[in-house]
Image (spheres, rainbow, N blue to C red):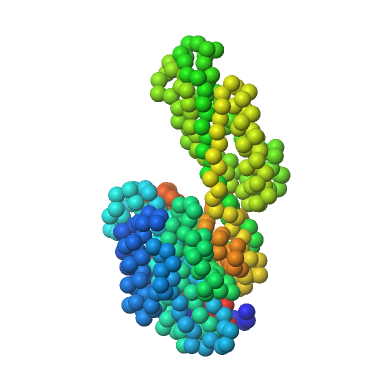
């Protein structure tokens, strides 16, 4: 990739992003009003297809029941020319919105509380700009509007399994995610391991119920569950190397319904997050061992189900270095910051296992943070000015990575 600054190109794209900003806002708000959960994004899929067709972009035949894939063909593509992929996720979360603006969710118990409406609108805006300027593209751009990021097994792996990257073979893939702790107009990037692998943990502790006045005649699963919670926390501090990030959180516990009755069973659930696949495998093994033997020591039994989630998201260092240059050209060097690794998870990781690329944080924050304006919150309310920077940055990244000067 030629890293020579392209001031004129950046200015043209910034100007066009400014001009279509109000249209992109309306796209975002329409998607926000009608959120759909993972694997259910039928209306959203139809809306994306209709919008792309309005831009003159014909969607490709579908690979999954929901989601949209399309290609913008560059006018300057040489034989064997490159293709880059841009991805946005389109699904919402199962929670009720508590905001007071005029475009709140119209669907009970559903909300775009993670910014996927923003991501989709940004990619649609970038698609419009790229289609208008495609005669200058030295390659093709693959647009991936992916379903089901929020619910394992996610939509990325099924798309890849259906042949997405075998058919289109990108040289790089790029994505972005709204983050309210990054200021609007800024981006944050991280080379290497950026987001954690996340696995779901489900425990069932079984004992013998009895009267609370005679615990010696029962086998108390509540006590067993309490000791299991403590024991698994020790794995992080005494099994995982100190320099390796790992988090085990037990987030729910259920058992019993009376003050004087020891229940027969307790269930718990939580997550395990790691940044290293070897550490992940070690913890899987040690978790099962610890849970079984802790329960046995207390006279109860315990079962552990581990549902394997998304892998570690690893940003290709070379591509990320190029992306930092591109972002600096478009936003200004003072608006490009290096991010620390995060323990959140993202199925964009699957794309990066088979194609070099990078995933960055696009700022949606304000100088005076509003309490409750956090991801996965019913009051998440990203700054819409971020639509302007996110739209233009995606389009500019595609141009620059394909070699336009």
| Residue 4, placed above or below residue 26 | below
Nearer the observer, 62 or 154:
62
What residue sits 49% from the left and 84% below the top? Answer: 74
Q: Quadrant of residue 230?
A: top right
Q: Quadrant of residue 351?
A: bottom right
Residue 259 x, y percent position in the rendering: 42, 18
Nearer the observer, 2 or 144:
144
| Residue 364, placed above or below residue 83 | above
Residue 276 x, y percent position in the rendering: 66, 51
| Residue 281, placed above or below residue 35 | above
Mark yes or no: residue 91 visible. yes
What residue sits 60% from the left and 55% below the top? Answer: 312
Which residue sits furthest front? 162
| Quarter containing the C terminus | bottom right
Residue 119 x, y percent position in the rendering: 43, 64
Nearer the observer, 250 or 371:
250
What residue sits 59% from the left and 68% below the top? Answer: 355
What residue sits 62% from the left and 28% below the top? Answer: 294
């Amino acid at each position: 990739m030629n890293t020579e600054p392209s001031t004129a190109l950046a200015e043209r794209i910034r100007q066009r992003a400014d001009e279509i900003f109000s249209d992109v806002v309306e796209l975002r708000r329409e998607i926000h009003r009608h959120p759909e959960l993972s694997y259910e994004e039928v209306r959203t899929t139809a809306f994306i297809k209709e919008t792309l067709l309005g831009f003159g972009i014909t969607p490709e035949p579908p690979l999954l029941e929901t989601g949209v894939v399309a290609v913008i063909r560059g006018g300057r593509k040489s034989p064997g020319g490159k293709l880059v992929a841009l991805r946005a996720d389109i699904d919402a979360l199962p929670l009720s919105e508590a905001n007071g603006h005029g475009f709140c969710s119209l669907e009970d118990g559903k909300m775009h509380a993670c910014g996927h409406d923003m991501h989709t609108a940004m990619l649609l805006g970038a698609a419009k700009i790229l289609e208008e300027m495609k005669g200058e593209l030295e390659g093709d751009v693959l647009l991936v509007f992916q379903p089901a990021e929020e619910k394992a097994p996610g939509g990325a792996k099924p798309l890849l399994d259906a042949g997405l990257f075998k058919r289109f073979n990108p040289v790089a893939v790029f994505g972005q995610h709204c983050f309210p702790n990054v200021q609007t107009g800024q981006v944050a990037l991280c080379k290497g391991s950026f987001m954690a692998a996340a696995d779901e943990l489900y425990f069932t502790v079984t004992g013998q119920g009895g009267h609370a006045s005679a615990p010696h005649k029962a086998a108390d699963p509540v006590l067993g569950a309490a000791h299991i919670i403590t024991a698994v926390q020790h794995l992080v501090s005494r099994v995982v190397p100190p320099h390796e990030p790992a988090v085990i959180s037990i987030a729910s516990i259920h058992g019993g319904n009376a003050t004087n009755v020891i229940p027969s069973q307790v269930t718990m659930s939580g997550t395990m997050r790691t940044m290293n696949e070897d550490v992940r495998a070690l913890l899987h093994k040690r978790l099962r061992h610890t849970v079984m033997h802790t329960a046995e020591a207390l006279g109860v039994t315990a079962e552990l189900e581990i549902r394997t989630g998304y892998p570690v998201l690893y940003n290709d260092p070379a591509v990320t270095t190029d992306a930092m240059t591109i972002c600096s050209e478009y936003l200004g060097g003072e608006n490009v910051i290096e991010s620390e690794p995060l323990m959140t998870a993202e199925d964009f990781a699957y794309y990066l296992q088979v194609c070099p690329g990078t995933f960055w944080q696009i700022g949606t924050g304000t100088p005076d943070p509003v309490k409750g304006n956090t991801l996965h919150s019913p009051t998440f309310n990203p700054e819409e000015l971020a639509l302007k920077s996110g739209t233009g940055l995606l389009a500019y990244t595609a141009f620059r990575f394909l070699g336009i000067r």
